[in-house]
Amino acid sequence: MTRFVGHGRAEVTPEAELTSVDDHLAGIRALLPPPDPIELRLADALGLVLAEDIVSEVEVPSFANSAMDGYAVVAADVVEATVEEPVTLTVVGEVMAGASQPPKVTSGRCVSIMTGAPIPPGADAVVPVETTSGGGDHVSVHRAVAPGTHVRAPGEDLAPGQPLVAAGRRLGPADVGLLAVAGVTRVTCITTPRVVIISTGDELVPAGDRPGPGQIRDANGPMLGAMVRAAGALPFSAGIVRDERRALLYAFDTNLGHADLFVCTGGASAGARDLIPDVIDALGEVTTAKVAMKPGMPQIRGRVADTPVIGLPGNPVSAFVSFEVFVRPAIRHLQGRRDVQRPTVLARAAEPLTAPPAKRGYVRVQLSHDDDGWLAEPTGHQGSHVISSIARADGLAVVPEDRTELGVGEQVQVQLLAD
Ligand code: AMP
Ligand code: MG
């Protein structure tokens, strides 16, 4: 295991000591166990990720039915119908949605029909009630219809063999509707990952307490819990733990049982009280990395008894950005999602966007739209302790490692903070 120690040199961190964002992410990915699918009722699957491709076994609609309330006719009977010279037909019956044996239609006759009702044998079109007059025993049709008009054809929505929902997709309400229509009542999904969160630091007090001298409120616990929930996973907040080796060992040990992923913040850097790497090392395996990013350089990954552990820096902005860059993709992998990254947009920089040499900069930006596309404007002070800079952000503008500044008007990729 490596520790962050000083070397009495001019440069804080030489480039050679940096780990790339992608390498740290790949290291985290390698710690994650394969997903464990379970079969459950469709009604319980909303928000879970499908573990299998689902293909339709049925045809929908399964029978020709009416798209309008009106009259089922033989289209050829009404080709000449106009408002001035309507065609009058004899009404020989009525067919409601759900009817199993609709009356037959022959030339010169029609059947009153409701939306969703089966098209009677012999009929090939539906005249909407609005373009007729009369009713009862006879009806006058004022407008011609072509064969097939207002008829929902069998299989027009779904055909057997048609893909419905692909593995890796998080089921939304529309997917539930689609699967229900196709008669799929049980699905194989990946269970919601449970993510344990602890905040470490002697200076921290719960947000509901008044901080004493030198103390601050725990921002990361509530924020990361909310981020886990927003990512569709189950947060389990294990509270604040002091910078004491025994307290940390106890907190890890007692909470690992609840966790598919363990996330801690603070104690990751070069301070005398930064004990997290030692603690993880004592219980399992750990890698510390100076990741080539700003904010968020000191990062930890490890594993304790098969549970992956991600250690984030304590500064709230660093914790927030690190969550977006490392924890959210890890959660999405555990959820079985194929789309592990959030969407990005290409924007123009409204102000210069800066990053240190050889590091990837994540600048909190607000997005607006004009005739030339998206415009990205930094949300004020970008210090990694300035939590107000994230609360106002729509996205993280990415300044690549080989650039220290993107000028006004230059194109920049912005990782959105919403899906
Ligand atoms: P550390 O990573 O422990 O060196 O902490 C870096 C900075 O983040 C220090 O200013 C801490 O006081 C602050 N910090 C650490 N944890 C939290 C937290 N949970 N909420 C708010 N600030 C924190
Ligand atoms: Mg600390």
Image (cartoon, rainbow, N blue to C red):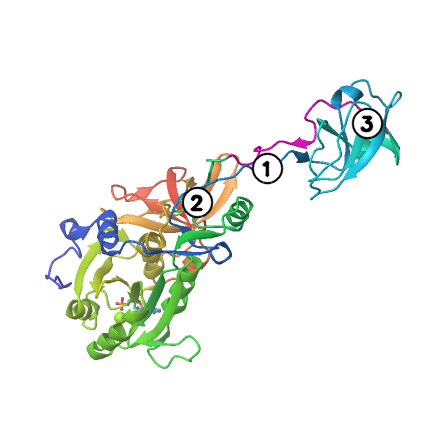
Residue for point 17% across, 57% down? 12
Asked if the magenta segment contains residue 146, the reply would be: yes
Closer to the N terminus: mark 1 or mark 3? Answer: 1
Position above or below: 51 against 2: above
The magenta stretch spans which residues? 140-159
Residue 101 location (% of width, % of height):
71, 38
For residue 286, say whether it is visible: yes
Contact check, label 2 and label 3, Cβ < 8 Å: no
Look at the picture and state if 289 lies above or below 343: below
Q: Quadrant of residue 271?
A: bottom left
- For the residue pair 246 and 60, the one nearer the viewer reads as 60
Residue 281 image offset from top left, x and y in percent: 16, 67
In the image, is 198 to the left or to the right of 99? left
2 or 1: tag closer to the N-terminus: 1
Which residue is disc 3 drawn over?
109
Q: Nearer the viewer, residue 44 or 387?
A: 44
Where residue 50 sits: x, y (%)?
Answer: 41, 49
Q: How far apart, in angstroms, are the residues tagged by discs 1 and 3? A: 26 Å
Residue under circle 1?
Answer: 62
Residue corresponding to mark 2: 376
Q: Residue furthest top?
A: 80
Q: Looking at the picture, which amino acid does disc 1 mark?
A: Ser
